[in-house]
Image (spheres, helix red, strand yellow):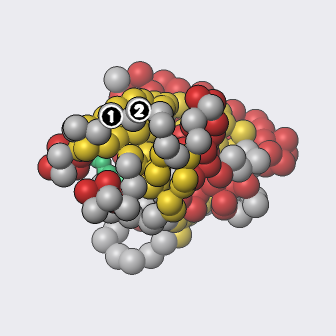
Amino acid sequence: MLNIALPKGRLGEKVYAMFEAAGYECPSIKENNRKLIFENEEKQVRYFWVKPSDVAIYVERGAADIGVAGKDILLEYTPDVYELLDLNLGKCRMAVAAPNEFHDDGQKTLKVATKFTNIAANYYASLGREIDIIKLNGSIEIAPILRLSDVIVDIVETGTTLKENNLEVKSTIVPISARLISNKSSFKFKGEDIEKIVESIKNQVNNND
Ligand code: PRP
């Protein structure tokens, strides 16, 4: 049985549809209830819904053999897993944003509010820019408006949240999308099954363009 961690939510539903189209369906998953674990004995797959940011933890520790996590999470927490495939879903970017009128003159320590402290720290270290990181857990866009920070490092998808708060992207750090990841020892011991799934899913990826 292959254990598969799916990110709960809209992205997870699209991801499951890819597994289904690849021949690993599990009809009970579509029943409208609060169950979190579903299996199809015949196909030898067991799916479970977890919080998107937790998928990599399940996979790293082997509670799931494979799973789907955002590149943002992989860059931020660097879990010890294999990244097998870019699913070309959940596409967005990690960006620096600030009020439209803000211009970094490089004179004083830059105050950066973010959920992604490692990504932000690595980015500014690569620029040799000194920063003061303010770790927040959500509604990051408010920080520069209330002068808690000068800029934010956050995910931008459509750009609507920034626009509605009079912020704009100042620079893009990295493009983000959903990735199929595998536990390292599962890949060794269930490698054949995992490869089979990867191959069938690969055929779906191009449809996501
Ligand atoms: C993300 C991100 C932005 C928003 C960007 O938040 O933090 O707030 O989406 O999307 P947009 O460019 O399409 O407006 P999310 O909804 O994931 O929730 P969060 O506040 O918990 O991070």
Mark 2 residue type: Asp
Mark 1 residue type: His
Front one among 110 and 176: 110
| Label 2 crowd (10 A; few <14 / some 14-19 / many >=20) | few
Q: Is residue 57 above or below residue 125?
A: below
| Label 1 crowd (10 A; few <14 / some 14-19 / many >=20) | few
Q: Position of residue 12 (x, y in %)?
A: 41, 52
Which residue, given by chain and number where applicable, does mark 2 sit on?
Answer: 105
Inspect this view and state whether residue 102 appears.
yes
Q: Is residue 101 left or right of residue 53?
A: left
Question: Image quadrant for the C terminus?
Answer: top left
Q: Is residue 192 left or right of residue 45?
A: right
Q: Position of residue 117 (x, y in %)?
A: 57, 52
Element marked by disc 1: loop
Element marked by disc 2: loop
**Residue most toward the left?**
164
Kindly identify the residue that appears in the image at 52 percent across and 46 percent down.
Answer: 109
Mark 1 vs 2: CB contact within 8 A: yes
Front one among 81 and 123: 123
Kindly identify the residue that appears in the image at 34 percent across and 41 percent down.
Answer: 97
Q: Is residue 184 above or below residue 85?
A: below
Q: Which mark is residue 89?
A: none
Which residue, given by chain and number where applicable, does mark 1 sit on?
Answer: 103
> Residues under labels 1 and 2: Cα distance?
6 Å
Q: Position of residue 190 (x, y in %)?
A: 78, 45
